[in-house]
Image (cartoon, rainbow, N blue to C red):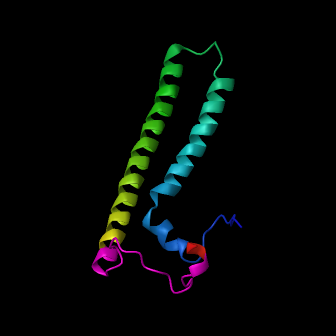
Amino acid sequence: MARLYIWPSGPRVATVRERPWRRLGAGISLVLAVMFTAGVYFLGDNRPPKVYAWYWSVIMVLVLWLFVLAVRDMSHTRAKILEKRRAARRNGRGSARQVESPEQPHDPRIDS
């Protein structure tokens, strides 16, 4: 069942504190949605072209900022995955051999 909490609790708190740019990206996305809608509906034809240029330039800068945040999150996630792989290899859990889980013992009926 999906948890629909606004403020996370438990083990996810560390992830949120570790990646504050995710909330920043969510906030920027919300601002972009409002600005885009307002720009389409409230910037009438009687505005000078400079107003359009500035308004949509701000939107483009925010979109680029979201892109930078996404690349940062991607590189952070990649680094964390590599760190976990290295730790698993150091502990001997990253080898090519099949290791059975103690929670689920091997069932010979499955092989037949």
Query: Would residue 17 appear left or right of 76 to someone viewing this image?
Result: right
Is 21 in the magenta?
no
Q: Position of residue 23 (x, y in %)?
A: 53, 56
Check the picture and name the quadrant holding the N terminus.
bottom right
Residue 8 in the image: above or below residue 25: below
The percent coordinates of residue 55 (x first, y second) are 52, 27
**Residue 71 placed where, x, y %?**
39, 48
For the stretch drawn in magenta, what is the main secondary structure? Answer: loop
Q: Residue drawn at (46%, 43%), measured in percent from left and top?
A: 66
Q: Is residue 45 placed above or below 88 in the rendered structure? A: above
| Residue sitting at the far front | 112
Q: Tell me where residue 31 sits by quadrant.
A: top right
Residue 94 belongs to magenta span? yes
Residue at position x 41%, y 54% from top?
73
The residue drawn where x is 29% and y is 71% is: 86
- Occupied quadrant, residue 97: bottom left
Near-viewer residue (42 or 104): 104
Along the horizontal axis of the image, is 75 left or right of 107?
left
Q: Nearer the viewer, residue 72 or 43?
A: 72
Number of numbered discs present? 0
In magenta, the rendered stretch is 87-109
- Residue at left offset 60%, top offset 34%: 35
Name the image quarter holding the C terminus: bottom right
